[in-house]
Amino acid sequence: MAPQSEFTLRGVAVGILITLIFTAANIFFGLKAGITFATSIPAAVISMAILRKFQHVTIQENNIVQTVASAAGTLSAIIFVLPGLVMIGWWQDFPFWMTFGICLTGGVLGVMYTIPLRRALVTDSDLPYPEGVACAEVLKVGTVANRSSDSGSDQAVSRAGLRALIIGSISSATFAVIEATKLFAASISHYFSVGVRSVTGFDFSLSLALFAVGHLVGLWVGLAMLVGALVGWGWAVPHYSALLETTDNSVIELAQAVWSEKVRFLGAGAIGVAAVWALIKLVRPVISGLQDAWHSTRLRRVRHTKTLPRTEFDIPISIVGLVVVVTMIPIIWLLIHFIHTSGLHAHVIPLVAGTAFFILLITILVAAVCGYMAGLIGSSNSPLSGIGILVVIVVSLLLMLGLGHLYPGDEVRALVAYALFATSIIFAGATIANDNLQDLKTGQLVRATPWKQQVALVIGVAAGAVIIPPVLDLLGEAYSFLGAPDADPVRALPAPQAGLISALAQGVIESNIDWYLLGVGAMIGIMAVLIDELLAHTSTRAKLPPLGVGLGIYLPTSTTLMVVSGALIGTVFNYHARKKFAPQADIIKQLGVLLASGLIVGESLMGVVLAAGIAFSGSDAPLALVDDSVSTLSLWLGGIAFLLLLTTLYRWIMRSGLQIAELNKYDTGA
């Protein structure tokens, strides 16, 4: 049999073309809203739509396309750090070669460091990888539906699965468009006073994609996020708002300010403890993964690939090491160049040596943590900015202790800029690690060849590194960033994460950061770890993932509460199917996963279209048909429509599963 096509020129070309759209949209969307969306699933859908017109297209080739596109789209999360250099007034624009170098070198390190993690975190792990699994289901359904050789119930399942995917996509895309017209409210929020001086509130984002993420991640992650949200908004926001002096801010402004300036640091501390604990638990499997990687290389060399299956071949670990060493050369050049242009050249040797070693070491740890987080909660909801916070604090603290006394007054700004620059390289690796293991999970499920997918990841990084600088430069010139010198506060892009991280760098180096908040958050994280371990050593199946608790504190309730809702309702749906329709439960559950995948696909694709419309029109709401005078009516319409749509979709999934089961029973009987 002729080998199946997998890594092809047309696949790479299609992936790069999709990258142009998704990376630009993700940069603008992230700077404006503070979030980015995963591009794997929409890239897979577009790939299947384009490549189906060609002959000899395989599921593995479509997987290569989404791998290239998703790697570049994920790299756009560099916007969580890099605009800080403009905000502090150090850069006036984004120099192409410097920005390109940061994205490329950090991204390549992220790819290389995830290769030995594949066996530990993907092959031998029970992490859910919600978006990776959803993307694999999309690829499988799209492939099987195009074949005519399958029979009976197999074709029925494939057709029903494709319908679930398409209906879910159309439903969420349509709902997103109606929200953009403001006929439906995009969220249900309520902020109120508690007692005399305390405030709190909640915000339910009416996002079908977030609901679907909750359905995919399951009950225990959802409950852990709920615990975090209750800690953040049930205790922390009321507590810290009561400590403030009287202000003229409204309730909502006060609540959001307290959460942004106080409570998010608690979440960062909890995430830090969860990350460290995840690393401790990963030491043994990671070492095992490295040993397996060396074993794989020896088998390839000695037995000429006859022992290991194709689906277990990674890039040889010797080549991984060589690429890491070669990548460090331009990193060192970038550091030297930045130092000589920042007035820090008197200490160039210790700065370059220390920073290069730190980047080499810390990126390994960050890659493992980000990969684990993506496997637990999904790339879209992984708290990358929390990792950025921890890294910039460590970098800034080291610089402050080592050189802070040598650069007083205005000169200290050079150390702040250098801290942000070094953090950007590490963060580029974090963003890629956050996505790569999702892609490799998809590859495992569709029987892709790991080394080919890993090469595609590097190509995706290179494509993204070329696109990001001009897009950032264009948006910076057109809008600027909130907090930057001479920025128009009405028109400027908020870039909330970059603002927070640059403020942290300044706070640490200038010795005015509130370590107390990070310490309280760390104590919350320790408590979550202890409870989770206690539950693990009992006979119950209950869990309290510490990272989920940290996420619930750190992320806004507009994200957290809808993910929690999806987890709870999805669990009830699957339980009902298992108890009432036990023989058909697996089919119903599979269709539920495909429906959730479709909901993510539709809203993600429409997010790209709407982001492009906002960017080109210059209007915050180019599709708006009504103004805020009908907000109450929009609130009721949006909430009722959201509930009715979900109820209808779940009932349809249940009926479809029962019909397939009946057909299967008939075929078996015949």
Image (cartoon, rainbow, N blue to C red):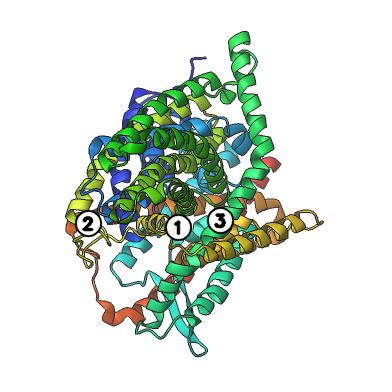
Which amino acid, mark 1? Ala
On screen, residue 607 versus residue 523, left or right, reads left
Q: Residue at x 50, y 54 (%)?
A: 596
Q: Nearer the viewer, mark 2 or mark 1?
A: 2
Determine the CA span between mark 3 and mark 2: 30 Å
Q: Nearer the viewer, residue 596 or 458?
A: 458
Q: Which residue is mark 3?
A: 271
The single residue placed furthest to the right in the displayed view is 539
Q: Is residue 98 visible?
A: yes
Q: Position of residue 604 (x, y in %)?
A: 38, 52
Res. 599 mark: none
Q: Secondary structure at mark 2?
A: loop
Q: Which residue is mark 1?
A: 209
Of the two numbered discs 3 and 1 on the same chain, state the one appearing first in sequence.
Answer: 1
Q: Residues within 10 Å of mark 1 (few under 14, many from 20)?
A: many
Q: Position of residue 483 (x, y in %)?
A: 28, 62
Which amino acid, mark 3? Ile
**Residue 532 vertical placement versus 294 (above, below):** below
